[in-house]
Amino acid sequence: MTALLAATFFTVKVALDRHSLQQNISYIIGRQFIRFQQLANQTRAVMRASADPNMPEYIIRPMVEDIQKAIDDIRAMSVQLEGLNNQVEANLLERLNGHDEASEKMRIELAGRLEDFLQRAERVVSTKLQERRERYSFWGPIDFAVSSDSMLMRQFSAVIESAHDRSDGSIDHARLISAGLLGLTAATLILATLILFIPLLIKLRTEHRRTLDFEIKLTHLAHTDTLTGLGNRSSFNEALNGLFGSLERTGTGFSMLLVDLDHFKATNDSFGHPAGDAVLNHVAAALQKTFRAGDFVARLGGDEFAALLPGISDAAKLEDIAGRAVAAIAAECNFEGRQISVSASVGGAVVPGYASDEVTLMRIADLALYAAKAKRNTAVIFDESSFAQRLEQNRLAAALAFAADRDEFVVYYQQKVNLQTGEHLGFEALVRWRHPQLGILPPGRFLPLMEGHLIQSMTRCIVDIVARDLRAWKTAGLHVGSIAINLPEALLVSQDGYDLIAAAVNANRLDWRDFAIEVTEDVFLNRGADQIAETISRFRKQGVSVSLDDFGTGFASLVHLRDFPFDELKIDRSFVAEIGKDIRSEQIIRAIIDLARNLGKRCVAEGIEEEGQRDFLLNAGCEIGQGYLYAKPEPAFAAVERLARRRAPRKLEAVKNIAG
């Protein structure tokens, strides 16, 4: 009797021990699954950040370190799982059950695929930033998700389900053996059961239920964005697969919207990451209020959101919904007593109108989003015109890569004058692109398509052209004043910008004062602002005037104005255009002029087109201006010709020969 009782007790305990081991295996597999999801999102984020030419390496470096930490964690969990599986194999009940070759094969395949994924992730982060930037296209993150997530998620689910099945099988075997042994001991074992075995069985059942509850919570966490409570990329992919499956079965169409926040990086840099998190939660709440209860809203990562709208297959209706989403996002967002400006660009597409699979749908929705981001705070639904526009932009972008080498950039000059006397004071150099087929293109057509290194190459061309023109005009005896050139942040944050102007001055025997430098308020938000300020100070020591361009449209604060070395403020044309129309713009202009005067700086107004605008600016105390009222941006000869009109015809002809 004692032997039977001991054998029964031992059998149940062996089953309980095996179940505990299997529970630990399930727990670690679950943790490994979540870590894998995080790694996939982090790797896509690095790929997307690397494709952004304006993203500095010091921001990407910590992201790469996080990815390597995730890889190490996943491999450490694999080692733990191997040890636990060995303990399970040594369990007596497992030996009685027989070797489960299918489960073992499935576990080995998962380990192999996971290691392959980790190696691909290591290759992404181990390459240099420039290699990633050149190798991975705009579609890299999306293709990465499509190729990596689906199979691994299915195998994770299969392994976890197999672990449950094996655990349930062990429990069933334990029950059968225990029942047989208990039947032999009859009434005597009833008492022993009440004292020994029932508590163990209750504990076993409780542990099993706790495991199931844990798996449910784990699945929820794996499919939910922790910040906003929306679905994450994994759940979005599942929902998208389900809608395409429904399309095949029933023919029911649907729509997709992609949402990307405007200037989100500037918000983070200006107000800090807690403010950025508040903005993301504001956007999540706005989207949930906009869409129906049956629609699926997800945060794909960073400042990217998406929505799936079952049953919406009409482009006009989708456009109306997208417009309401844009308006809801643009509503007030308050953080710690201050109002943060929020806006978003939305791109959408209808299925099956232009797409029959997930990859195509993502691409055309991204095309629409790209078109929306060109305007900001708007929604665009994909159609043939937006596709044609993107093709045209792609062709322009491809041609831009060779524009500097082919000397296709030209400089137009706009005159700056004394508002009181009309006296000529200097020029601002403005770039144009002489496209081989399209002719002269304004900067609005091509500057948004240019990456950092292309902008630097273009700026070098502009400086060389301006230096040559200055030398020719000075040789002709013309007094043209200083010529202002816009220098990008990339040239100011290093020695390159100063060296570029110095080389032009020396090569053309010019004076430093022949040049002026214009920068925008964005330099204040650059993490290299201290280096930029040092570069600007070096220019000023050489006598170069420095202007703060487009003042009032960025994020400048009084502290920035106090500490940053500059000589003049330029009032943006958007304020000047509202003179006589909007009293608020007029008040802002007066405030800027008073601020410049109190700081001991000059004030320049851009975009003057009417006499009334000039009179207002003069009365407000502004002394310098430029705009169509005085001169449009013109080629070199046209710009200086008016300066030479009072000179002798022979001298004018010499000027034409030199400038032409």
Image (spheres, grey):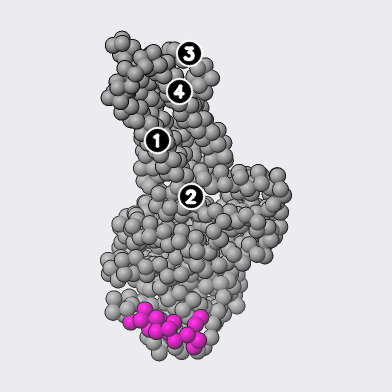
The three-letter amino acid code for the residue at tag 2 is: Gly
Counting residues from the N terminus, which is met first, the one under dot 1 or under dot 2?
1
Residue beneath disc 3? 98
Quick one: SS at disc 3?
Answer: loop
Residue 132: % across, % down = 49, 39
| Image quadrant assignment for residue 440 | bottom right
Residue 355 or residue 422, whichever sits in front: 355
Counting residues from the N terminus, which is met first, the one under dot 1 or under dot 4?
4
| Image quadrant assignment for residue 412 | bottom right
In the picture, the disc for residue 172 is: 4
The three-letter amino acid code for the residue at tag 3 is: Gly
Counting residues from the N terminus, which is met first, the one under dot 1 or under dot 3?
3
Quick one: SS at disc 4?
Answer: helix
Give the CA separation, mark 1 to mark 4.
15 Å
For label 1, the crowd category at 10 Å Cα-Cα, with few meaning under 14, some 14 to 19 and many 20 or more, is few
Residue 477: % across, % down = 49, 71
